[in-house]
Amino acid sequence: MTALATHYDPTRENDSFSPLRFLWTVIRRDMLLAARRRGDWLTSQFFFVMVVSMFPLGIGPEPEVLRMVGPGVVWVAALLASLLSLPRLFAEDYRDGSLEQMLLSPEPTVLVTLGKALAHWCIYGIPLLLITPLLGVQFSLPAEAIGVLVISLLIGTPILSLLGSIGAALTLGLRGGGVLLTLLILPLYVPALIFGAGAVDGALSGIGYSAHLSLLAAFLVLTLMVAPWVAASALKVSIE
Amino acid sequence: MPETPAKLTVHDLACARGERTLFTGLDFELNVGQLLLVRGGNGRGKTSLLRLLCGLSSPLDGEVRWRGDPIRRTRDVYHREMTYVGHVNGVKDDLTPLENLRMAAAIADRPLDEAHALETLKRMGLERCLDLPARVLSFGQRRRVALSGLVVAGALLWILDEPLTGLDVHGVALVETLLCQHVAQGGMVVMTTHQPLALDGVDIVPLMVGELSAAPGGQ
Amino acid sequence: MSIAWFKYSSPATFYGLAGKLVPWFGWSAGILTLIGLYIAFFLAPTDFQQGEAYRVIFIHVPAAWMSMFIYMVMAFWSAIGLAWNTRLSFMMSRALAPTGALFAFLSLWTGAFWGKPMWGAWWVWDARLTSALILFFLYVGIMALWAAIDDRRRGDKAGALLILVGAINVPIIYFSVKWWNTLHQGASISMTKAPSMASLMLWGMLVMAIAAWFYSIAVALYRVRGIILERERQTEWVKKLLEARS
């Protein structure tokens, strides 16, 4: 026929790399957009630093006390910082119509939600990991505990992005979406918080931390298997 | 090419928005080389119909078929062969027009011929805006970016929701030319518009939406 | 024998059926509660370790059971609703949520009352209490999501998805809280392993649990009737019904 149908290329049909390529496209897209708009995501990083820095002012400067609460404070601040940045995960694309275009892609929607959650982690989670050692020093944590804290956040923050993507999809376009998102998702974060902060406590008290980290990793694997599908269904429901 | 000929069929379609039933028992068929012009007053369900046809929402009843198969089941084939331009353009504010086309092609999993894309943007009258982020473009210019994407994608079926809004006289003329060419080449179009269109020699299938529920339920 | 299940899955027939069932379950719940409370306060012996204060478990334990069980039932209805898009299942899960939240709240409240004489504190971060608290948060989140979404179809499905995610998460939350609790060696006096519970106590608890069941069924059916009327108000049978009433 005419030039119109040339895009229908049977060789691309059986291309087994196409899901991976599409996933990478989605991640790259969100990272490019974030790079064009640095102010947006830097706010949640500064929020993280500020929340953590407020605690010593409220609790008092005794190193003993700070060491005890440090891991929990850093973890809770990480939860809040993720919740602060999550409402934007789909909202911008929803507003300008590009989210619809992504749902109309021939590739499965689950790759969109997975890709966007992973991009969110790269943008929000990785910088968090880089700042954390400094905050650990503020709370006079020993070097080993700081190492465990960073590793626990390395495993834990993807969980926050993935679970959060469900909440962001469910609350898309609702009034008061940000607060609602917090209400829905915070209870689901509990296991990550317990295993993550617990690992550091284990390192501090000498009980050991490997069991905590293994459980955290198991929770990550489970979340990775379930969350993108739920988020994809939620997205379809919300955009309908 | 798939065996079955390109054809969009709608069978006994019903759509509800909130508590209100917009239309029921809608049937039509669209073949190659035809343009379906959806008409109807505000709030009668034109946009809802278009979103149903895209597969963005699911009907209350009935189904949409592409090449004889329900689009729910052959979603990937269908989405490879259609392009939708909705009320909002799907143009990212932070990207230049060409970057936008590049991104749209990547998301739709289509190869992009950069030279062709550039040429299309120029043809759409965006020559002077090529280095600017879409943020600073006017609404009409962003509409032109979206329509360039439509041309570059080269899909068989175009689904256009009010493509003429925000366009000036030249823009409208351009779109008319595009539509005529596309249909003449054996393409298919489903579109809504409130403006008169000069489409000479195009096989137009008119469709009125929302007539059935003259007294819509609810107040 | 074939029961016309599908007949009762239509809101119109179910409305009538529910209407007949509500008084039965309601009255039985009331009577059973009276019997249960009589056993609890007059027949059941004083516990030699915990004194009189333990009697709050006759409310606490059934409430805690019910709050978890109702969540499971909601998850069941949500899964059915998402799989087959049946209208009634979403209505059922909407009708159940407030009762579930009520029982979760009740179990927290009575847990605090029980905790004061036993642990010397109103609140202890015990594994069970903490899980109940988080379950309560989940209920609140679900109801907040429903309240925020105006579109009925979207609300139904979004709520169902959230309920299902919660259902997967609740066991993990419970496990993680328990693990956290043992590591921190908090005060953990086991609640269920009350030493050699007298059979009369067990009976009292059982009767109260059944009363809670019947109460939940009655209230959920009552509420679902309201939801059916509201959602089907466009249909002929509701219009006829309303005309007949006025």
Image (spheres, coloured by chain):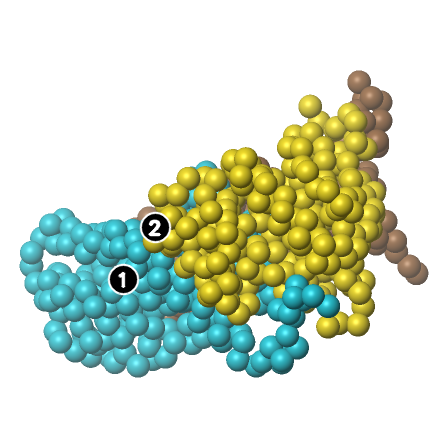
Chain colours: A cyan, B yellow, C brown
Chain under label 2? Answer: B
Question: Where in the figure is residue C18, as x and y percent of width and height?
Answer: 77, 41
In percent of width and height, residue C227 lies at 68, 37
Q: Is residue C74 above or below residue B217?
A: below
Q: How crowded is the residue under tag 2: few (<14 C-alpha within 10 Å), some, or many (20+)?
A: some
Q: Chain of mark 1?
A: A
Q: Nearer the viewer, residue B32 or A85?
A: B32
Residue under the point 72% across and 65% down: B73
Front-most of A3 and C100? A3
Residue C78 in the image: above or below residue A3 = above
Residue in the foreground of this view, choosing between B162 and A182 = B162
Image side of residue B31 versus residue C195, left or right: right
Q: Is residue C228 above or below residue A240?
A: above
Q: Circle 2 sits on which residue?
A: B132
Query: Are the residues flagged by discs 2 and 1 from a single subunit?
Result: no
Q: What residue type is disc 2 on?
A: Leu
Q: Which residue is mark 1?
A: A75
Does residue C75 appear anywhere in the picture? Answer: no
Residue A82 lies, in percent from the top left, at 33, 57
Say what amino acid the circle numbered 1 marks. Answer: Trp
Mark 2 vs mark 1, foreground winner is 2
Circle 1 crowding by C-alpha within 10 Å: few under 14, some 14–19, many from 20: many
Tell me residue B97's x, y (percent). Answer: 42, 54
Which residue is at a point 73% across and 72% down the rendered structure image?
A: B1
- Residue B22: assigned label: none
* Circle 1: element type: helix
Q: Is residue B119 visible?
A: yes
C-alpha span from label 2 to label 1: 41 Å
Lateral position of residue C150 relative to residue B39, left or right = left
Residue depicted at x 42% and y 76%: A218
Count of numbered tags: 2
